[in-house]
């Protein structure tokens, strides 16, 4: 079957231009879905070679899915871009950085935390110097030294450093048995929010297990490395299938969206397919269960003015747009204000800015404009990559606005924060 057959459904109307963040900041046809589909069509019919020259247009897409949401025949451009990335990787070979990340770091959370701690104590200039000395700038991207400013200072103590995998009793004896799937980003760059999530899940369930999971596999899948993504998924499936859990909850919308797609990683006759279907049916984004926890008490201090940014993996990836807004609006001590273009990608897109810093920055500027217009003190979201990028944008603009995970706002007034 032609993997790119749906290209022919594109009627070249150009409606994808209206919602594409990349096109809106560049104006280049090659950056919009219609242009990318023309590229894939040329690769398919052989009028264009699978050479190094196609790497940039293939990997400059944010994969946000906005084009498909605004496309009358709903051409799945992001899915076909991923398919093309997989084929490009098969033809060009895996890069050393990909082997390091996907084979030796992401499958082993302990190693990943050790690397993060090293980055936390080294000045940015030394991190860049080490990357240059190891020849990694070729693979990290030419913008890597500038992109280090985005993350800022990595917390010295990830969640798991002080919270070993364990099960503890919840407060609702009739509630579900919950497994908390900890995303790499929440563990390493938003550990304080992950601790708030644990407290929230404790109110919801009869028991909560802090799972010893590894990376969900989304980074490998995004870079076209399906083999590595499957191996990471298999590790997690072995772990999750052997536990008596009613729900598997994660507070990273990117992890949640990908865990729900685990069955797609395996062919119908693959032994892992059935296991993946069972496990994915139990997965919930934290956004889906917040309403069960209730609004809590009126917190001390002044009211927070809060706006909300939709992670692409929450809104288009899972259809979760109403629950977070309803929840934030219900919280005492919160004045909720809707943001213009709240569902537009912020340019974070995982590690996108490492190789596309300037392009990501231009996408981010548009988002920060809209945040500023709301007059909010806090912009909430449920994706650590988005939060890091939004924080950076507010810092660079000099705005008195914090990017905060929704679990921290949900726990305001319930904890000692």
Image (cartoon, grey):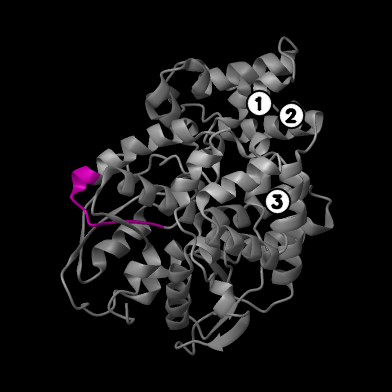
Q: Considering the numbered disc 3 on the image, is that residue within a helix, a strand or a loop?
A: helix
Q: Is residue 319 visible?
A: no
Marker disc for residue 101:
3
Quadrant containing the C terminus in the rendered view: bottom left
Image side of residue 321 versus residue 79, left or right: left
Using the rendered view, name the quadrant where residue 234 is placed.
Answer: bottom right
Relative to residue 41, is residue 221 depicted above or below? below
Residue closest to the eye, 127 or 212: 127
Relative to residue 245, is residue 377 depicted above or below? above
Q: Considering the numbered disc 1 on the image, is that residue within a helix, a strand or a loop?
A: helix
Q: Residue at x 62, y 40 (%)?
A: 140
- The Cα–Cα distance between marks 2 and 1, rounded to whole angstroms, is 8 Å
Q: Earlier in the sequence, mark 1 or mark 3?
A: 1
Q: Are marks 2 and 3 in contact (CB under 8 Å)?
A: no
- The Cα–Cα distance between marks 2 and 3, rounded to whole angstroms, is 19 Å
Marker disc for residue 55:
1
Image side of residue 209 versus residue 236, left or right: left
Q: Give the crowd class for mark 1: few <14, some 14-19, many >=20 residues within 10 Å.
A: some
> Mark 1 or mark 3: which is in front?
3
**Hey, which residue is sitting farthest left in the picture?**
302
Q: Earlier in the sequence, mark 2 or mark 1?
A: 1
Q: Position of residue 52 (x, y in %)?
A: 71, 22
Residue identifier under label 2: 88
Relative to residue 282, is residue 202 depicted above or below? below
Quadrant containing the N terminus in the rendered view: top right
Q: Position of residue 148 (x, y in %)?
A: 50, 46
Using the rendered view, name the quadrant where residue 106 is placed.
Answer: bottom right
Q: Which residues are magenta?
A: 372-381
**Hey, which residue is sitting farthest top in the picture?**
47
Residue closest to the eye, 276 or 402: 402
């Amino acid at each position: 079957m032609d993997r790119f057959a749906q290209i022919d459904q594109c009627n070249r109307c150009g409606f994808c231009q209206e919602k594409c963040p990349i096109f809106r900041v560049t104006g280049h046809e090659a950056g919009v879905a219609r242009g990318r589909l023309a590229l894939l069509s040329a690769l398919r019919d052989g009028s264009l070679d699978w050479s190094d020259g196609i790497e940039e247009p293939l990997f400059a897409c944010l994969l946000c899915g906005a084009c498909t949401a605004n496309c009358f025949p709903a051409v799945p451009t992001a899915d076909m871009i991923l398919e093309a990335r997989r084929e490009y990787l098969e033809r060009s070979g895996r890069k050393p950085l990909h082997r390091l990340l996907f084979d030796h770091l992401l499958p082993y959370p302990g190693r990943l935390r050790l690397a993060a701690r090293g980055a936390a104590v080294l000045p940015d200039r030394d991190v860049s110097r080490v990357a240059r000395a190891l020849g990694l700038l070729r693979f990290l991207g030419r913008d890597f030294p500038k992109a280090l400013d985005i993350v800022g200072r990595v917390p010295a103590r990830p969640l798991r450093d002080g919270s070993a995998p364990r099960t503890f009793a919840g407060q609702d004896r009739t509630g579900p048995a919950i497994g908390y799937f900890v995303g790499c980003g929440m563990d390493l760059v938003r550990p304080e929010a992950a601790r708030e999530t644990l407290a929230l899940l404790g109110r919801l369930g009869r028991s909560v297990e802090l799972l010893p999971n590894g990376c969900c596999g989304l980074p490998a899948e995004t870079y076209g490395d399906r083999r590595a993504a499957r191996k990471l998924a298999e590790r997690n499936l072995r772990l999750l299938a052997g536990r008596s859990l009613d729900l598997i909850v994660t507070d990273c919308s990117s992890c949640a969206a990908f865990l729900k797609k685990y069955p797609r990683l395996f062919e119908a006759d693959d032994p892992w397919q059935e296991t993946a279907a069972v496990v994915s049916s139990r997965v919930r984004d934290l956004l889906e269960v917040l309403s069960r926890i209730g609004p809590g008490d009126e917190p001390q201090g002044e009211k927070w003015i809060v706006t909300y940014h939709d992670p692409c993996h929450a809104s288009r990836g899972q259809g979760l747009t109403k629950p977070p807004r309803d929840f934030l609006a219900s919280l005492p001590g919160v004045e909720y204000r809707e943001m213009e273009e709240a569902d537009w990608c912020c340019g974070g897109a995982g590690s996108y800015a490492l190789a596309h810093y300037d392009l990501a920055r231009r996408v981010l500027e548009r988002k920060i404009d809209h945040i500023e217009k709301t007059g909010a003190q806090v912009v909430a979201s449920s994706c650590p990559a988005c939060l890091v990028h939004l924080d950076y944008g507010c810092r660079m603009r000099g705005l008195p606005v914090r990017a905060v995970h929704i679990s921290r706002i949900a726990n305001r007034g319930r904890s000692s924060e």
